[in-house]
Image (cartoon, grey):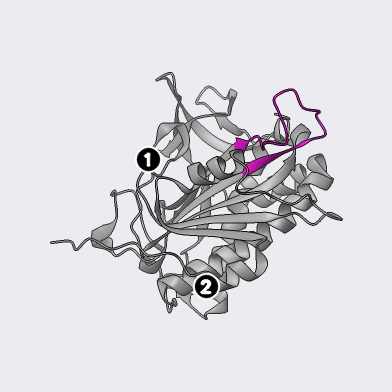
Amino acid sequence: MMIALKAATPQLPRTTAVADHVVAVDETDSTNTLAAQMIGDGSLTLPDHQDGELAVVVVAADRQTAGRGRNGHKWVSQPGRCSTMSYAVRIPRAIATDESVNGWLQMIAGLVTLDALNGMIEEYGAAPNQPDCLLELKWPNDVFCHGLKLGGLLSELVIPPSSGTDADADDDVVIVFGVGLNLALGACRLPTPQSTSLQLHVSGLPSFGEMRDAVAERQVEGFRERLAKFIADPKGQAESLREEMKAVCWARGRQVEAHFTDGTTLTGEAIGLNEDASLILRTQDGADHTVRTADVGVL
């Protein structure tokens, strides 16, 4: 019989030291929803960015009762085993709404997450159980290990009360990046056969609480650094990110099937990303197709 785990308020001393503000609760429906509500009602504010330094606010919970993924999917997590965090950052409205570059915001969130996980593993002297145990990104929003889902990301735009739908294009909006990670789940607690957990692939990891805090600390710093560079030069950074994604894009070079929200599918080889971060899918007839919103699975 599986014993139910009790939620406790996350203790995040390292994250608190680097973030502009941290809201930590034992339980909520969704950290993204809580962050959006608090930003919307003015109870959570983000300072203006000063001299290129971005403010990053963190909302953390030990248990989510209604965690969300892309396209209406649910995110199932367990307290004391899974990290559920949202990171809120002010972004110029012109960038957040520019479809030629805003797809890279999700890719940045993924790269920040990989950097944070790999950095934490190195800090504690942990080591993968197998030499090919690489952390990768399954376009557009999943952290993968050995073809299994270790984590998921969800980015959402929030209009702060100081702005409005008719505000000037130079105004800021807030992007909330939700990051859910299976850090210390045992094999018997995995929610689906397609999921996995970091502790199943890496030995020598610290306690869950230490892992969660060390990863979140790095994510705050990573979002601050990477997004500041992106805001300063979106087009130039897009090209750099496109090159960087070649090494960690799990789908690249694989035969995959894209499932669209209208129920249709498209099968082909994922050959890379376009300049706007959309996926290039080459079908058997040699034609290249652009995939912007879909669930992508390997065949």
Q: Based on the picture, tell me whether residue 167 belongs to the magenta stretch.
A: yes
Camera-side residue of 157 and 11: 11
Expressed as whole percent of the image width and height from the top left, the position of residue 291 reads 56, 28
Residue 219 lies in quadrant: bottom right
Residue type at the position of mark 2: Ile
Query: Is residue 140 visible to us here?
Result: no
Query: Is residue 156 visible to us here?
Result: yes
Q: Based on the picture, tell me whether residue 266 belongs to the magenta stretch.
A: no
Alpha-carbon neighbours of circle 2 within 10 Å: few (<14), some, or many (≥20)? many
Q: Earlier in the sequence, mark 2 or mark 1?
A: 1
SS state under label 2: helix
Camera-side residue of 217 and 49: 49
Please name the residue shown 54% across and 46% down the image: 35
Which numbered mark, 2 or 1, is in the foreground of this view? 1
**Mark drawn on residue 74:** 1
Majority secondary structure of the magenta segment? Answer: loop
Instruction: Give the position of the C terminus as an image quadrant.
Output: top left
Please name the residue shown 66% across and 67% down the image: 18
Camera-side residue of 147 and 52: 52
The residues bearing labels 2 and 1 have C-alpha atoms spaced at a distance of: 28 Å
**Mark drawn on residue 121:** 2
Residue type at the position of mark 1: Lys
**Vertical order, 294 against 125 (above or below):** above
Expressed as whole percent of the image width and height from the top left, the position of residue 247 reads 61, 53
Instruction: Give the position of the N terminus as an image quadrant.
Output: bottom left
Camera-side residue of 232 and 195: 232
Expressed as whole percent of the image width and height from the top left, the position of residue 100 reads 73, 30
Span of residues in magenta: 157-175
Please name the residue shown 49% across and 30% down the image: 294
Expressed as whole percent of the image width and height from the top left, the position of residue 158 reads 62, 37
**Vertical order, 105 against 247 (above or below):** above
Total number of numbered discs in the rendering: 2
